[in-house]
Image: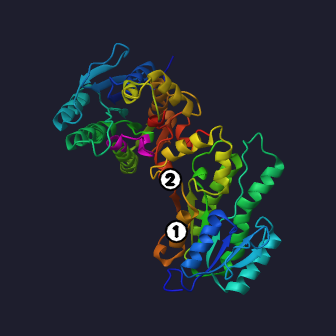
Amino acid sequence: MTGGVLDGKTALVTGGRQGIGRGIVDAFLASGARVMTCGRGERPEDLPREVAWSRTDVSRRDQVDALAGQAERELGPLSILVNNAGVQITRTVTETTDGDWDRLMGVNARGVFLVCRAMIPRMSAGGSIINIGSISGRTADPGLALYNASKSFVHGLTRSIAVDHGPAVRCNVICPGWIMTGMADEAFALADDPEAATRDALARHPVRRFGQPSDIAAMAVWLASDQSAFATGQCYVVDGGLTAASPLNPGLF
Amino acid sequence: MSGMLQGKTALVTGGAGGIGTAICTRFVREGAEVVALDISPLPESSQGAEQVQCDITSEHQVMDMAAGLSRRWSRLDILVNAAGIEIEKTIEDTTLEEWNRIFAINVTGMFLVSKHVLPLLRKSDGASIVNFGSYDGFIADPGLAAYCATKGAVHALTRAMACDHGPEGIRVNAVCPGYVDTPMLQSFFGDGGDIESLQQAVRDVHPMKTYGRPEDIANLVNWLASNEARYASGQLWIMDGGLSAQVQQMRL
């Protein structure tokens, strides 16, 4: 490994099995960091050998405490924490069950809190926490009530951590737009005409393409690196320009 | 019946426009004495406001207007900066002359009128300035580059004025309308094909399934102008039928 911006740093990424989390794991590795990731299942077969894996449900306090202990043994003091693990449930408030609440808020809200609480004391000075929020935490996606609300929670918690735990750690949130992951594929598959839906969605992105996990990972590398040493408490939107444009684009009608 | 603005004096720029007319009419109904500035004559639907011809991009005309106002009134309670134009172009298609013209009206005019009536506003025991921003000051409509930029400037100017003149008892807010049924909106729709279907499509994008009427905006301006809003200052009040609360609505 030659001269990466994260040389000598250690990183824990939650939810690194696939999608954005996996993209961040790969980018951190390529930038010279030692990386550990976790998920609720067995270690993915294609995870690079040098990445440590912990089977962890971040909504469970006992499992998060075990994760923190394992991270300390494997990596030593932690320089970078990425709270990426999240779930999405497509329901409005009146459709949502108590079980939905527990499952979604357990991972997206409590999980972020538990991991931060366990890891902040174990982080090295100048550490960087990167939470994955969403553009849906700023403006609403229809039918994703708890998901939207959980991401607003992440945005708020990010500011609190930045304020309360600076200068020891920095804490920022990345708000991805439409990133081509399993979650987005599911949305298009539900469309009456998936091809037309895809065309319409593309037209709403000034960059005329959807995001890739690597687009979010590139921002995560920057926020993890010392290049962003003055950045804390902020929401960084990476969405190909989607939310810069009005939802009402007469050119599309 | 005593109105919310009984005994107040109000100056409304752009008072002959779609939203300006609705504001003047509402203010008069609430008991205010209203002077409407515009370069165009007031429409017949405007009732009770007195027009003063003034090109707000000309500092000497604005100073003359302010001098006339201070002869007429001992104080000014309400200033609404509603004058504005729209240029439907990208920056590449916008000439420097057009760029300067839209900034002259939407931003410089707001600066000049506010600056020169400040002495009269200070004499009020609770003055309120309401500037016209737009949801376009937050997120962009395609092909409205200079307009979006002027509205961003208005938002920043609003906060700056609120900070500077709050201690003098002057509240400053901006209202940020979304799509409101005015001549300006009709012009924006103008060359977009079948206007009926276009308008229906536009309605459908709003969570409230409609766009606004000038009276809706006047309701908010009336409240911001009134003593009920005595603690409201320095804010950007979006009113858009929920349009900008959403992430872009993919048609899935």
Examine the structure image and report whether residue A102 is included in the region drawn in magenta: no
Q: Which corner quadrant of the image does residue A106 belong to?
A: bottom right
Residue at label 2? A209
Q: Is residue B135 depicted above or below A75 in this figure?
A: above
Number of the label disc, if any, that sits on residue A190: none
Dot 2 or dot 1: first in sequence order is: 2
Q: Position of residue B224 (x, y in %)?
A: 47, 35
- Span colored in magenta: B136-148
Q: What residue type is labelled 2?
A: Arg
State left or right for residue B123 relative to residue A214.
left
The chain under label 1 reads A
* Element assignment for label 2: loop
Q: Which corner quadrant of the image does residue B46 belong to?
A: top left
The outermost residue toward the front is A195
At 56% across and 62% down in the image, what residue appears? A174
Q: Where is residue A165 in the image (x, y as percent from the top left)?
A: 60, 73
* Element assignment for label 1: helix
Q: Is residue A135 depicted above or below B145 in this figure?
A: below
Examine the structure image and report whether residue B146 is included in the region drawn in magenta: yes
Q: Which amino acid does label 1 sit on?
A: Ala
Mark 2: give few (<14), some (14-19) or many (20+) Cα within 10 Å: some
The chain under label 2 reads A
Report how far apart the C-alphas of labels 2 and 1 lie in the structure: 17 Å
At 71% across and 84% down in the image, what residue appears? A72
The outermost residue toward the top is B44
User: Are the residues under badges 2 and 1 in a single subunit?
Assistant: yes
Q: Which corner quadrant of the image does residue B62 belong to?
A: top left
Which quadrant is home to the N terminus of chain A?
A: bottom right
From this viewpoint, is residue A204 visible?
Answer: no
